[in-house]
């Protein structure tokens, strides 16, 4: 009999399963509704021989030595420095907006004057939020803040979140930075890489343990039931621990209504050219209905005369039709989540881990670290 049941074979569930099996030697059942492991990190080789990320591009970037060391036990790495361009006013410029972007988009005299003022005031290398620039009291700097807000952030956010400009929280929109350097990398973390064999292979190695049993194509509703403060597995009371990484509102039958998420309509296509664009990802904040195009050969180079592209069209999450990707945070949704959390507290042996169960956004390194911490605090 299993002592632990884990719902979800994404990063959170797989890390928890691996730790329990390898460190405690206890039997673990992992239940996954999809046909594959890896969650939204899932990747596979397509018909062009290119390793593609089926739920959008994922790049590991972290300053945590603990996270990188842990994952290195299951994968070799391809060092990769992610660069993103934004298509703005007909030009492709580095994002986040930096001094190179400034020179490429604005007249030379204005760009030079702005650079001198910005570096003199904030220091070279600073990442200055737009909100701070808007309150500088300098007309030139305030002009730049408004320019970056309108050209880089406003319409991209409108597409990504489906919100009108007046519905956006200015405190949130004001946090987008201007980077006062010429470093065109999207991330500046100490460790930046992609798994050499892909994320799916990495997660499969995590779960490759004699104490771990994996059930794919299985909804937790088929095997688990929560009622009257007790957890039932296959019709009988389960006295072990359940680690749940799925949607908390779904777990409790949407008793208080659905928690809203944004999703993505992911459109893959092949192009009869060796390379399509200069970098892996090009954002389109103001043009077209999609938000970005990713070309996967930049992430995983391969000898192919064709290339594979992904266009991302943000959309509303509809249960059963698409994947829940990004929680939509409002005071109302946070209050609703707290009500679901109160229901979860009625079950002493229920542990919630992950972006869906905790209704928060996690980068990959954050969720690995979170799972390692939960193992230390709740399992050991």
Image: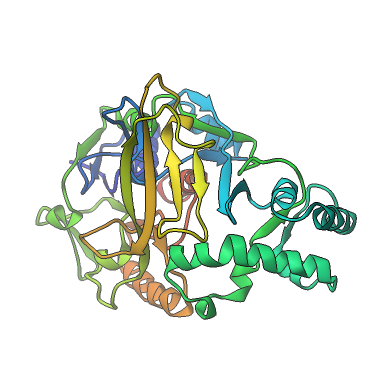
Residue at (40%, 19%) from the top-left corner?
Answer: 303
Question: Is residue 183 found left or right of 344 in the rendered image?
Answer: right
Q: Position of residue 209 (x, y in %)?
A: 29, 28
Q: Position of residue 293 (x, y in %)?
A: 44, 46
Question: Is residue 256 found left or right of 282 in the rendered image?
Answer: left
- Looking at this view, is 307 or 191 the one in front? 307
| Farthest right residue in view | 120
Whether residue 356 is situated above or below residue 70 in the rendered picture? below
Residue at (85%, 70%) from the top-left corner?
Answer: 138
Question: Is residue 154 found left or right of 346 in the rendered image?
Answer: right
- Residue 295 falls in image quadrant: top left
- Looking at this view, is 33 or 263 the one in front? 263
Residue at (70%, 65%) from the top-left corner?
Answer: 130
Question: Is residue 279 found left or right of 359 in the rendered image?
Answer: right
Q: Position of residue 294 (x, y in %)?
A: 44, 42
Q: Can you see residue 103?
A: yes
| Farthest top residue in view | 303
């Amino acid at each position: 009999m299993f002592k632990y049941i884990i719902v979800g074979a994404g990063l959170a569930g797989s890390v928890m399963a691996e730790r329990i099996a390898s460190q405690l030697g206890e039997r673990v059942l992992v239940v996954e509704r999809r046909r594959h492991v890896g969650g939204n990190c899932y990747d596979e080789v397509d018909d062009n021989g290119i390793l593609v990320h089926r739920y959008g591009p994922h790049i590991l970037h972290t300053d945590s030595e603990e996270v990188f060391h842990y994952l290195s036990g299951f994968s070799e790495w391809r060092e990769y420095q992610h660069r993103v361009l934004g298509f703005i006013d007909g030009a492709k410029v580095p994002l986040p907006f930096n001094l190179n972007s400034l020179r490429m988009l604005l007249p030379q005299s204005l760009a030079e004057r702005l650079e001198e003022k910005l570096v003199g005031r904030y220091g070279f290398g600073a990442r200055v939020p737009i909100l701070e620039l808007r309150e500088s009291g300098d007309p030139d700097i305030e002009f730049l803040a408004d320019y970056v807000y309108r050209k880089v952030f406003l319409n991209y956010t409108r597409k990504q979140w489906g919100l009108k400009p007046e519905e956006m929280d200015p405190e949130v929109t004001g946090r987008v930075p201007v980077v006062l350097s010429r470093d065109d990398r999207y991330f500046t973390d100490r460790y930046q890489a992609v798994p050499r064999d892909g994320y799916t292979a990495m997660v499969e190695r995590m779960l490759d343990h004699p104490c771990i049993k994996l059930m794919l194509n299985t909804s937790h509703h088929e095997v688990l039931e929560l009622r009257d403060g007790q957890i039932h597995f296959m019709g009988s009371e389960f006295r072990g621990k359940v680690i749940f990484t799925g949607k908390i509102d779904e777990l409790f039958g949407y008793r208080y209504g659905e928690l809203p998420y944004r999703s993505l309509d992911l459109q893959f296509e092949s192009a009869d050219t060796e390379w399509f664009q200069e970098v892996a990802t090009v954002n389109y904040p103001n043009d077209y209905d999609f938000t970005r195009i990713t070309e996967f050969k930049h992430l995983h180079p391969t000898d192919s005369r064709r290339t594979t592209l992904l266009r991302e069209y943000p959309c509303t999450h509809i249960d059963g039709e698409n994947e829940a990707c990004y929680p939509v945070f409002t005071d109302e949704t946070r209050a609703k989540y707290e009500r679901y959390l109160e229901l979860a507290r009625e079950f002493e042996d229920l542990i919630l881990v992950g972006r869906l169960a905790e209704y928060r956004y996690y980068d990959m390194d954050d969720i690995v670290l979170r799972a390692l911490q939960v193992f230390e605090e709740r399992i050991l």
